[in-house]
Image (cartoon, rainbow, N blue to C red):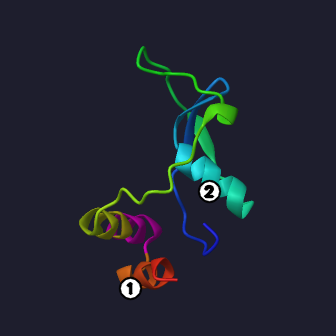
Amino acid sequence: MQYGIKFNGIKVFENLIIDGHHRYVSSLITKIQIDSVPGQKTSATKIHHWMDVKFDENDWDTTSRIAYLNEQDAFYNKIDIEIIKQITAL
């Protein structure tokens, strides 16, 4: 976000984030506003209060998953994959 990379808006239903929790937290950290779009609450939706959330600092993404997501970001932003690789290497 801080390098100008665009992301999809977070999906919100009433005051619940349905999809985009990581994007929301990233927007708070970088102080960059991210769009929100309407989302739908389902029977699988669980409500958690932010004060109860524990951050897991383990990196769960594999090298191949990161490469895939970088390609998706490059496509979505219409920029060369090498720019994304440079940004993520910082």
Relative to the observer, which residue lies in front, 77 or 42? 42
Residue name at image x 52 percent, y 58 percent: 7
Q: Is residue 21 visible to the viewer in this orientation of the structure? A: yes
Q: Residue 25 in the image: state x and y as whole percent.
A: 63, 50
- Label 2: which residue? 26
Kindly identify the amino acid type of the residue bearing the numbered disc 2.
Ser
Kindly identify the amino acid type of the residue bearing the numbered disc 1.
Glu
- Label 1: which residue? 82
Q: Element type at marker 2?
A: helix
Residue name at image x 41 percent, y 19 percent: 44
Relative to the observer, which residue lies in front, 64 or 33? 64
Q: How crowded is mark 2: few (under 14 residues within 10 Å), some or many (20 or more)?
A: some
- Check if residue 49 falls in the magenta segment: no
| Main SS class of the magenta portion in the image | helix
Residue name at image x 64 percent, y 32 percent: 52
Label 1 or label 2, whichever comes before in sequence order: 2
Q: Which quadrant of the structure image shows residue 38?
A: top right
Residue at the outermost right position: 31
- Check if residue 75 falls in the magenta segment: yes
Which span is picked out in magenta?
A: 71-78
